[in-house]
Image (spheres, grey):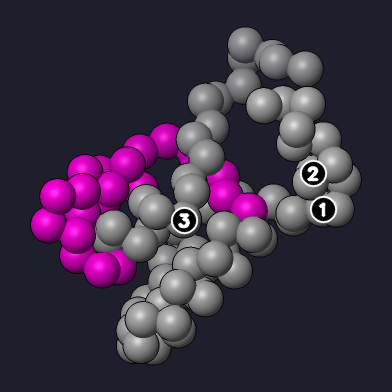
Amino acid sequence: MWRGDLPERKFVDSNVFLYVLRADPRYGERAKVLLGEGRLVTSTLVISQVLAHLERKGSLNAIPLFLEFLEDHPVEVLPTLFEDFIEAPELC
């Protein structure tokens, strides 16, 4: 249930992290700004997606940077549950 007195949270999907880590020429700078704004939330699924992408692309040196960012910044990491996949079609 929405409570207007809570600070706004921003969900960060994998592409935002990847734009910064891969220094994307089009979206990298804007992604950096987004990562510095407000309360950030992501999921264990997103973290897994970022790590898999970095490994697949041979960017192993970026993995520790990504994990350090998550540890050092106020990013709330929510678990991805099986129930999330069951409820997802209803949200669409």
Q: Distance from label 2 to label 1 (Cα)?
A: 5 Å
- Among the two numbered marks 2 and 3 on one chain, the one whose residue lies closer to the N terminus: 3
**Which residue is denoted by mark 2 in the rendering?**
84
At 69% from the left and 14% from the top, the residue drawn is 3
Q: Are marks 2 and 1 in contact (CB under 8 Å)?
A: yes
35 or 55, which lies in front? 55
- Among the two numbered marks 1 and 3 on one chain, the one whose residue lies closer to the N terminus: 3
Is 9 contained in the magenta span?
no
**Which residue is denoted by mark 1 in the rendering?**
81
Q: SS for tag 2? A: helix
Where residue 17 appears, as percent x and y from the top left, is: 38, 58
Lateral position of residue 91 relative to residue 54, left or right: right
Q: Residues within 10 Å of mark 3 (few under 14, many from 20)?
A: some
Q: Given the image, on which type of amino acid does mark 2 rest?
A: Asp
Q: Are marks 1 and 3 in contact (CB under 8 Å)?
A: no
Residue 73 in sight:
yes
* Quarter of the figure that contains the C terminus: top right
At 21% from the left and 54% from the top, the residue drawn is 28
Magenta stretch in the rendered image = 21-43
Q: SS for tag 3? A: helix
**Which residue is denoted by mark 3 in the rendering?**
14
At 52% from the left and 76% from the top, the residue drawn is 52
Residue 64 in sight:
no
Q: Is residue 90 above or below residue 21?
A: above
Q: Given the image, on which type of amino acid does mark 3 rest?
A: Ser
Q: Residue furthest left?
A: 25
Q: Residue furthest top?
A: 4
At 62% from the left and 11% from the top, the residue drawn is 4
Residue 9's disc number: none
